[in-house]
Image (spheres, helix red, strand yellow):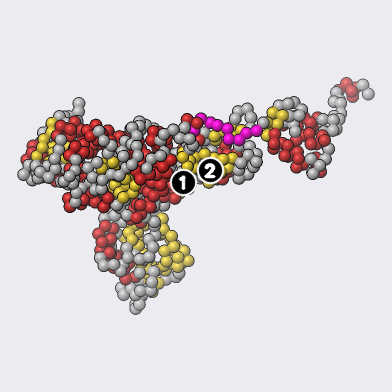
Amino acid sequence: MVAPKTLLLCSCNKTQSFNPKALQAAADAEQVVVVDQLCGQDMTTTARHLSGGDELLIACGQQAALFERLSEEIHAEIEHSAPLSTIDIRDRAGWSAPDANPGRVHAKQAALIAAARLPAPQAPVKTIHSSGVCCIVGPTEAAIRMAELVQDELGVTCVVNDAGPILLPSAGYDVARGRLSAARGALGNFTLEFAQLQTLNPAGRGALGYGEVKATARSECDVFIDLRGGEPAFPGYQKRNGYFWADPTQTGELERIALTARERVGEFEKTVYFKLEASLCAHSRANKSGCTRCLAVCPTEAIVSAGDHVHIDSDICAGCGACAAVCPTSAVTMNETPFEALTQALDVMASVYREQTDEAPRLVFHTLGAGADSIARLARYGDGLADDLIPLGLAHVDRIGHAELLAALGAGYAEVLILVDNDTDRQAVAAEVELARAMLEGAQQAPGRVRVIAAEALGAAGDHPGRVCEPVLLVGGRRDVTRVTVGAMADPLDAPIPLPVGAPYGAIEINADQCTLCLACVSLCPTGALGDHPDRPEVQFTENACVQCGVCQSTCPESAITLQPRLDVSKDALSARALHGEDPFECVQCGRPFGVASTINRIVEKLQNQHWMYTSADQVQLIKMCDDCRVKAQFHGENAPMAGGERPRVRTRDDYLDR
């Protein structure tokens, strides 16, 4: 039996208004309670409901930690507290401009609460073990200073890269001298490679010296502190667990790193952000290269080639979701924010808003870190979000691809915006935004309906010329939703929509003059877009299944295949069509069709009277025979070149007795 729910609303000292009945319906709550200062003078109301038996939803995100502590205190006192959850509707909706439309504001609040009711996807976790073995690389002065800061908690080895003096040896850490040549791994599993490594010799009297030089050496550690001050050892180094990079010349940097690095000992839970279905991956077939989109966008280099598919290192993966956003076959999906969960949230918020306003809302994707902070600052010190702009927070906006953008438009949003935190985020989403805009333009829609914005534009009114389509059913995978949405937005199209190079939709062209119908492309196509005809030499193509991976192009021995990035939303794209075919050659002996007529004729033309083995008509005829007839002619014909002599009669016992 589901416990009844109580919704607590706080006007935050009468600075925001509500439609309690609409919010009660959105939260599916049995009762709604409205107060003015839930974290202050009305906190007794919070305590009373936490002591009850109803599930409690508090519409205040700012003081969520306070309510959690109060719940723990009540539980410790009476050994019971009501199930508690919180949601922010003040910063994201309640605090708006003075001239904001109250109906839109209240509808947005209801949309946010309705989306919060959806079940949150659960991502699996793995355990990472760290024994606290630490390697510090950098100049002598900075490395020794860092070693002194962390030696009490970590087992430290310093590898210095200069000839700086070491006055006294230390029993708290080891010292060596060398040059870092390579690094890989993550927290609990780093492997470092060094060149020209010398270990410090602490014995003897006088100045300390180093031992014999080793040309190469390898070391393993749990924590890696990089104080070299140049380029970090890893791309996207901020997302690499257990790796700390700093410029040692900056004041306070060593102390800042030391505070965090000292805590990297013990067992840690690492979220497994992704799910990889290797059988769907179109990376390669038979050593012929195909799709490399995820390899190109991964900011941490967690993805590597592993033959016919890619491999993702879950220790290195930071969960940005860029790989899932560009994967054309859905071989990579996200556990925390699967596409289906996103589309469900988009659909719920848009439908609740439309029901209460009869208008199309706008949507902004933002990060839960800097993006959420920008929204909070705008709400407190500015006019807040535009009254028709519904925010949806994600851990990383890299997760947003063209399919998510199109899904939002398919749900009925008038505009879809992406709030980026920095230029890195802007570059990460640029290609997918360009692809979505190309689809909009091809569907006779304003491409400006999909935009990347900065925080300053959050309060601006919408500017979305063009027709907003009726909501479509957001069912199926990324490609299905994209196709349905573009088809719903477009008037009947006379031709497919051209797309940028690298788009995961399109057709292929076969140069009939070069193609020999060897069907190598058919045998290696990873998605089944290419097929053959059961009765004749022919290449068939189903455009809706093509992801433009390029395996067919790299496989073709005649270089006869060209990729055509485009989106065809017609029904013709769903069924197979012939790309290139020819009549088969009929065996001159038995009449059975075999091979390709043009190929057989070309072989005859090149060999007849041009090669010593094919100077007679009988020899040329062998080329025109099927396998069975060719064998018979070669071994049993009157002038068969491979025929043996006449076999002697078999002798029996009677032959010898009759002598």
Q: In the rendered structure, does residue 648 fall within the stretch colored magenta?
A: no
Residue 350, numbered label: none
Amino acid at circle 1: Pro
- What is the count of numbered marks? 2
Q: Extreme bottom residue here? A: 206
The residue lying at 44 percent from left, 39 percent from top is 329
| Quadrant placement of the N terminus | top left
Query: Where is residue 328 shown, x and y percent of the image?
Result: 44, 41
Q: Extreme right residue here? A: 659
- Asked if disc 2 and disc 1 are in contact, CB closer than 8 Å, the reply is no
> What residue did someone put label 2 on?
563
The residue lying at 28 percent from left, 37 percent from top is 360
Q: Secondary structure at mark 2?
A: strand
Along the line of sight, which residue is nearer the eye, 277 or 607?
607
13 sits to left or right of 527: left
Query: In the image, which residues are magenta?
Result: 573-582
The residue carrying pointer 1 sits among few (fewer than 14), some (14 to 19) or many (20 or more) residues within 10 Å by Cα, namely some
Q: Secondary structure at mark 1?
A: loop
